[in-house]
Amino acid sequence: MHKETSNRKHRVLKSITMVAALTMLLVPGMNAYAVPLATSNIGGQVASPAAIASKPKLAAPRVSSKSVKVGSRSIPVQTVHVPKGYVPVAAFGKGKYGAAASLNEMMRNHQAVAGINATFFEAYNGAPEPWGTVIINGRIEHVGNHGTTIGFRKDGSVLMDTLRIKLRGTVTNEKTAREQGWYAYFVNRTPAKNSSLAIMFTPMRGSHLGFAYGNAVTVRNGQVTSVTSGQNVPIPKDGYVLVYTGKEKKMAERFKKGDKVTQAFEYTNKDGQAIDWQDVQTAVGAGPRLVKDGRVALQPAAEGFQQDKILTLSATRSGIGIMPDGSIMLATTGSATMKQWAEVWKQLGAKQAMNLDGGASTGLYANNKVITSPGRLLSNVLLFKQPK
């Protein structure tokens, strides 16, 4: 019995030796000590070098303080350089649309290595709802349709464009087979009482709409479950609610309980040209665009901005840039006009860059430390995490 066991162990150890030898032959430059093979469980499977080798550790984000000369001014800038490989995440305060939290709280809750305030939001009247486009985990959770948006794909590539999103669909009556089209302008935006709007509300909005006006169509698993008027209806976790107000109320008449519903998003730039954003997983919209292909490309009015604090005045600024190697730079400054801010980003070496929300919202974080502290709670942030 002992002899059989001894022979079996000898055969297994011999096999292990052969695997190690083959590994060294197949992997150039590997020596006998480069990747140890698992041999503790003699009677079990031999672990492959690929299974044992750990993922290379990403370099920590680099924090810098710089002074950038623009004309006669020296503009102080705080920067965080985020190497390629970190996972971008757009997040709302308290993990809920229309809520706010401190920059430090949001970063720590998500175990972020770096982050910055993101899109503009309602900071003075009512709930702190975002104004720009926000995509989280591949789901469009808010549509702004102005300015510029930065988007991150699963494969690590990064896009920047004047993204405009349209939501269209069909509704088909099961009995008559009659098919009609429908549309919505925005996602999760609270409509003013006297407005004429068409809006989709997703589960990110919360358990209910939060208001009781307009005509509401509830859709679950692609089927209409109710059509109501003037009610604060619940938002299903496996569906959405379409709300039509003012002159758009008639659109709700196309829907009947039991009808089949389809929906699709269309992506274009501000000039109406189709762009491929279908597989973007994370995105935040703000703007205006500052740098395009390494050159200053500032056209705020063409992107829909009319406020003096964007067009002419100096203010505290936040921004994000795509560097030539595909890495990301985050930056803030205490005071700059938008023209100066664009020139700063050009001198920082950005290939693409855009402005983010600024003023009291300006906030920057890296390596467990708040670098630029916002003067208010934030509705949303863009952060970067270690990959799993």
Image: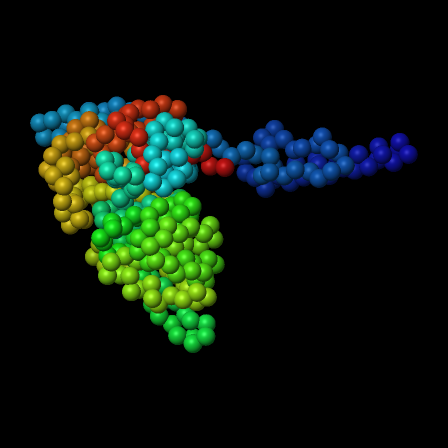
- Can residue 210 be spotted in the picture? yes
Of 143 and 218, nearer the camera is 218
Residue at screen point 31% across, 61% down: 183
| Residue 259 percent location from the top left of the image | 43, 67
Residues 94 and 108: in front is: 94
Residue drawn where x is 18% and y is 37% of the image: 342
Up the image or down, 238 lies above or below 60; here it is below
Please name the residue shown 24% across and 38% down the image: 125
State which quadrant residue 335 falls in. Answer: top left
Residue located farthest toward the bottom when viewing the structure as drawn: 176
Residue 137's x, y, as percent?
Answer: 42, 46
Q: Position of residue 251 (x, y in %)?
A: 31, 64
Q: Quadrant of the N terminus?
A: top right
Q: Is residue 85 left or right of residue 374?
A: right
Q: Residue furthest right?
A: 1
Q: Return the x and y of residue 38 as percentages of the image width and height.
A: 67, 33
Left or right of 296 in this view: 160:
right
Colouring scheme, one of rainbow, by chain, secondary structure, one colour: rainbow
Left or right of 190: which side holds 301? left
In front of the other: 341 or 209: 209
* Residue 149 visible in the snapshot: no
Q: Is residue 364 above or below residue 246?
A: above
Q: Is residue 117 above or below residue 289?
A: above
Q: Residue furthest left?
A: 72
Task: Examine the image and state in which quarter residue 19 appears.
Answer: top right
